Image: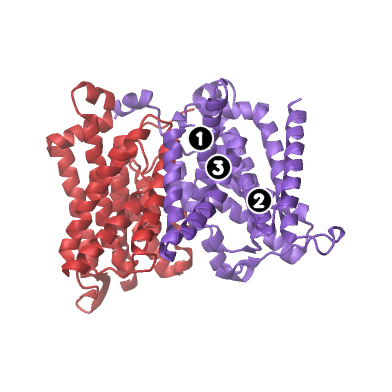
């Protein structure tokens, strides 16, 4: 039943997107493709943080792994696109498994620190193994529109189609997973790790699984990002990207797939929109390139102050009497909850 | 052997800067349970203030003082204006708000000062010191850097240990509700904590910028390493932050010196993971091991 409902919703969205991509110009199609790549990665991250209660400030690293995997497969082995995407997701999942094993031992800021360092350190591999990974220049990725669409078919529309298809499939799979036994187990261990463990859940295994699935999404998102931007280089997978993913997930509303879409919309459209406004008001180039950055910072702060449970949480509160599902206490993301603090420190 | 001494001493100088950033993070973490991701941005901003004062007056020390003073003010203003409003919200919101602050400060610096790289003067000569005929790999400025951070850390320790204000700071970090019941004005204490963190961060900014140039993102990588230092030491412990900074500085400098600069950040990651796998809450954590 749930599967049918989610698939139905996805088909509906796909139809709307089909019309949109045909009606809109190449630039908007490109932005939609970019959006789809971000949504895929952010959706995985929002499940990791919002459902399983682990934080990652380094998801850009998994995107990089997926993107490089895709570039290498396309460049050297000429695999078909769907196989490349699947392989990128697998590459991300494998890396996530390794990091997840370490992450299952860490909590809160310590996990944040470790993943942050991962995001900083990983791109330097591209310089070290410049022969295979192309160094600073990166690897170029080119895909061609299939012949049956005709020669005059706009390539950006094809990009938008394949990225949106991949994103929608990911979202349907994640939506079902969230409603499944696994999703419920994640929520249980997020809300109270000890209680979840006493109820027979293998906490470490569930946490690692969350990391694997989340980084598979990031790997796929990275591959989509690679085909959208034509090039895979270390400059695209900076710490700034990782932080953008995190802000999108939290801004949209943690644990909510709709929230992942809202957050990604902010990520893709707010900077370009402010830039347009800034340039049209005749600001100098130094100012007009920096005003969007400053404005984005202000937007982040204001949204968090106005809607503590993210955009999706705010919408739920405004639109209906339904209790927000994603606003559960995230005490576990701290090293210890306030209640146990005195006890622990008292035993020093 | 001589190389080893050079790399180690140079690492100590860098390590003290990471220690200063780590120390400012620990101050805020203990007080408010918030990780201040904007610490690097704040330090970048106060360093611009210092540069303007130096260019205006031609005196390095006036700029130095201006940076510390503006760090103090900036920390207090941010606590009053922004942080206070997120105290009772989910902790992840604080992450985003401080990241928002960082992005805002970097954008603002770009608007005001432009994005170009500016050089920042060192406090003393940057010519390498020698002992007899052996080069030590450090300069007078490096010695000053290490001494200044060490002095700041000791002054902070004295403030915490021997003054009434320090007792209030410790009480608030230890048990905020009890402290409030005992009549401590928690709000003021927290503002003071942020102001002190701003000051230490500003010190780190002024000390590190001569070797990095000054631009809106100039403190990002320093912040990451300072954060790593604090995590290695254990976020609860100021001593841990200093030790973590020194360990990280020396390890990175040795790795960079012997194995080439390509992989320095990977060695940082390796050092961090190694420490965290042995002690998941850092070297100097005092809390009991979480058992599930």
Where's residue A159, x and y in %?
Answer: 72, 56
Separation of marks 1 and 2 at Cα, in angstroms: 22 Å
Q: Say which residue appears at 59% left-offset and 26% top-offset.
A: A201
Q: Which residue is mark 3?
A: A263
Q: Chain of mark 3?
A: A
Q: Chain of mark 1?
A: A
- The relative height of residue A343 versus residue A145 in the rendered view (above or below) is above
Q: Which residue is mark 2?
A: A32
Horizontal relation, residue A11 to residue B174: left or right: right
Extreme residue toward the bottom, this view: B133
* Res A339 label: none
Question: Closest to the observer: B10 or B189?
Answer: B189
Separation of marks 2 and 3 at Cα, in angstroms: 14 Å
Q: Say which residue appears at 40% left-offset and 40% top-offset.
A: B281
As helix, strand or loop, the secondary structure at mark 2 comes to helix
Question: In which quadrant is the N terminus of chain B drawn?
Answer: bottom left
Q: Chain of mark 2?
A: A
Q: Is residue A298 visible?
A: yes
Where's residue B235, x and y in %?
Answer: 34, 41
Q: Say which residue appears at 33% left-offset and 65% top-offset.
A: B214
Chain A colour is: purple
Q: Which residue is mark 1?
A: A310
Q: Earlier in the sequence, mark 1 or mark 3?
A: 3
Question: Closest to the observer: B220 or A151?
Answer: A151
As helix, strand or loop, the secondary structure at mark 3 comes to helix
């Amino acid at each position: 039943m749930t599967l049918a409902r989610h698939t139905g919703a996805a088909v509906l969205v796909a139809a709307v997107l089909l019309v949109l991509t045909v009606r809109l110009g190449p630039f908007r199609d490109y932005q939609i493709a970019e959006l789809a790549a971000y949504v895929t990665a952010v959706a995985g991250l929002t499940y990791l943080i919002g459902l399983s209660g682990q934080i990652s400030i380094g998801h850009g690293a998994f995107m990089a792994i997926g993107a490089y995997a895709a570039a290498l497969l396309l460049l050297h082995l000429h695999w078909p696109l769907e196989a490349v995407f699947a392989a990128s997701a697998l590459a991300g999942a494998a890396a996530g498994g390794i990091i997840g094993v370490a992450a299952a031992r860490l909590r809160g800021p310590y996990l944040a620190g470790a993943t942050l360092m991962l995001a900083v350190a990983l791109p330097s591999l591209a310089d070290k193994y410049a022969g295979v990974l192309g160094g600073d220049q990166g690897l170029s990725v080119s895909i061609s529109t299939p012949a049956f669409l005709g020669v005059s078919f706009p390539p950006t529309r094809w990009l938008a189609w394949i990225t949106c298809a991949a994103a929608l499939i990911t979202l349907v799979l994640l939506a079902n997973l969230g409603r499944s036994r696994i999703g419920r187990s994640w929520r249980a261990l997020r809300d109270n790790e000890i209680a979840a463990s006493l109820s027979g859940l293998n906490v470490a295994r569930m946490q690692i699984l969350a990391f694997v699935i989340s980084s598979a999404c990031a790997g796929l998102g990275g591959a989509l990002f690679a085909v959208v931007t034509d090039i895979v280089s270390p400059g695209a997978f900076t710490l700034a990207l990782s932080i953008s993913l995190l802000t999108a997930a939290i801004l949209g509303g943690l644990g909510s797939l709709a929230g992942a879409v809202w957050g990604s919309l902010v990520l893709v459209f707010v900077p370009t929109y402010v830039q347009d406004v800034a340039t049209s008001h005749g600001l100098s180039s130094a100012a007009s390139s920096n005003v969007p950055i400053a404005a984005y910072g202000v937007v982040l702060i204001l949204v968090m102050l106005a809607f503590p449970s993210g955009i999706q949480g705010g919408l739920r509160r405004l639109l209906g009497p339904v209790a927000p599902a994603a606003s559960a206490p995230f005490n576990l993301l701290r090293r210890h909850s306030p209640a146990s603090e005195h006890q622990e420190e008292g035993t020093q | 052997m001589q190389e080893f001494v050079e790399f180690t001493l140079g690492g100590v100088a860098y390590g003290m800067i990471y220690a200063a950033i780590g120390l400012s993070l620990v101050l805020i973490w203990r007080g408010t349970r918030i990780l201040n991701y904007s610490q690097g941005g704040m330090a970048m901003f106060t360093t611009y203030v210092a540069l303007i004062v130096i260019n205006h007056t031609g005196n390095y020390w006036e700029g130095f003082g201006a940076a510390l003073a503006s760090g103090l003010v900036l920390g207090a203003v941010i606590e009053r204006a922004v942080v206070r409003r997120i105290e009772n919200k989910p902790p992840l919101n604080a992450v985003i708000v401080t990241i928002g602050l960082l992005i805002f400060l970097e954008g603002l610096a770009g608007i005001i000062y432009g994005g170009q790289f500016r050089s920042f003067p060192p406090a003393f000569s940057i010519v390498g010191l020698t002992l007899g005929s052996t080069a030590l790999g450090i300069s007078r400025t490096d010695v000053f850097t290490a001494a200044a951070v060490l002095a700041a850390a000791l002054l902070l320790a004295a403030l915490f240990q021997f003054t009434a204000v320090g007792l209030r700071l410790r009480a608030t970090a230890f048990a905020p509700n009890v402290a409030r019941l005992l009549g401590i004005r928690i709000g003021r204490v927290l503002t003071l904590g942020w102001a002190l963190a701003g000051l230490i961060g500003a010190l780190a900014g002024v000390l590190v910028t001569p070797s990095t140039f000054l631009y809106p993102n100039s403190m990002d990588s320093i912040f990451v390493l300072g954060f790593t230092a604090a995590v290695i030491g254990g976020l609860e412990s100021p001593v841990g932050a200093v030790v973590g900074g020194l360990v990280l500085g020396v390890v990175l400098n040795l790795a960079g010196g012997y194995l080439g600069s390509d992989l320095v950040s990977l060695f940082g990651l390796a050092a961090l993971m190694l420490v965290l796998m042995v002690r998941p809450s850092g070297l100097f954590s005092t809390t009991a091991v979480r058992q599930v």
